[in-house]
Structure formats: structure tokens, C-alpha cells
Image: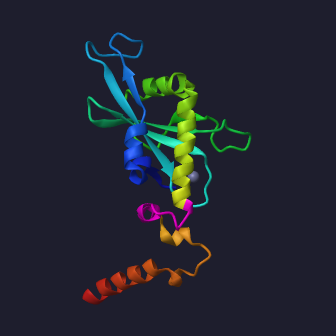
Amino acid sequence: MSMVMFTVLYPELGAAETRCIILQSGGRWHRREGKEEEFALFELYCAEPSCDCRRAMFNVVSKRLGRHVATISHAFDPPGEKSAVSEQTFLDPLNRQSDLSEDLLAIFTQRVLMDSDYCKRLERHYAMFKDVVNNWHHPLHEKIRPYFDELEYEPRRKISDIPSWHVRNRIRKNRRNRK
Ligand SMILES: [Zn+2]
């Protein structure tokens, strides 16, 4: 499953509606003297057609360091009995983390997610994103196509009907001929 930044499809809206965590100097989580610290929560959603996983991933980027310092995975719904993952919100083990991750996760679950308007905004962004992924006629659909793996994407079509298969084959053939 590939997770893609919301801003890839909606750069302006994404920039306007990306939440930041600002830590005031002297506050509970603030570790450095003096200045406040700011972290942006960049949203990513799943670009798999017809998958309705109802989750968001967040790349947490430190403004001071200019670096991605934590990755948080969050499901909109609490896990059910059959869920593969038992936590609703957690640090993604496959993606980037740092020594700031645990604190950022605590702030995210204890503060950010308490804001119901923000939670609604995430669901709205998810719906907008999924609409583009699933609707071939959507004006933004072209932007998401490069993130699809075409061979996986169209299981009911014969592989040889997929244009990119022919292109790949031609490239392979040319390489073979050159040897
Ligand atoms: Zn999904």
C-alpha cells in the first residue's frame, strides 16, 4: 500500500489546513531553553483503489531541524475484534522515528486528537483524497496515477492488455539486444 501526501493532490488546501504542534518554552514537553518549537503534521492517505482503510499517516516535521522526526499512524475508528492492529494510534514501525517520537505521539493523542473539528477535517481530507483515487474521471486523477502499480491495480485485465506491460517488455528486449 502506498501512502501519499495530501498536498500532492491539494497543495493549497493542504498548506492551509496542515496542523502544527507548537511547544511553548517551559511547557511540559518542551526540552530546549528559550524558543518555542514547531512541528508540522503532514497528512498522508492510502492510494490503493477501492481500499477503504479509513486511516491517516502523519509525517511530523520539525521546523527548527527541517527534518522528518516522527511518523504516526492513526485509524479513524477504534480497532474492532478482527483488526490486524490492536492500537488506534501508534508510531509506525516501518517509517522514520527519532528520540522525539514518543513525546510527539503523546501530544498527538492527548491534545491534537481532542480537537473534534480537526478530526472531522481529517475525515474530510480522506474522503477528498479517496474520491480522486477511485474516480478515473476526477480532474486530479492524473496526479495520483504515477503512484499506482498498474500490474497490481488491474487484476481482472490480462497483463498483455496493459500498455505499461508492453513498454516494460520493449525496454527489456532492447536491453537484451544490446548485450
Ligand atoms: Zn487503504
- Taking depth in this image into account, of 176 and 38 the one nearest to the observer is 38
Question: Quadrant where the C terminus lies?
Answer: bottom left
Say which residue appears at 54% left-offset and 47% top-offset.
Answer: 126
- Residue 179 appears in the picture as rendered: no
Say which residue appears at 25% left-offset and 87% top-offset.
Answer: 178
- Occupied quadrant, residue 167: bottom left
Vertical position of residue 173 compared to residue 43: above or below:
below
- Taking depth in this image into account, of 96 and 51 the one nearest to the observer is 51
- Residue 142 appears in the picture as rendered: yes
Residue 171 drawn at (x, y percent): 34, 82
Q: Which residues are magenta?
A: 134-147
Vertical position of residue 105 compared to residue 36: above or below:
below
Say which residue appears at 57% left-offset and 36% top-offset.
Answer: 120
Residue 155 drawn at (x, y percent): 59, 72
State the colouring used for the structure image.
rainbow
Looking at the image, residue 128 sits to the left or right of residue 17; the answer is: right
Asked if residue 139 lies in the magenta stretch, the reply is yes
Residue 142 drawn at (x, y percent): 43, 65
Looking at the image, residue 73 sits to the left or right of residue 17; the answer is: right
In the picture as drawn, the residue positioned furthest to the bottom comes out as: 177
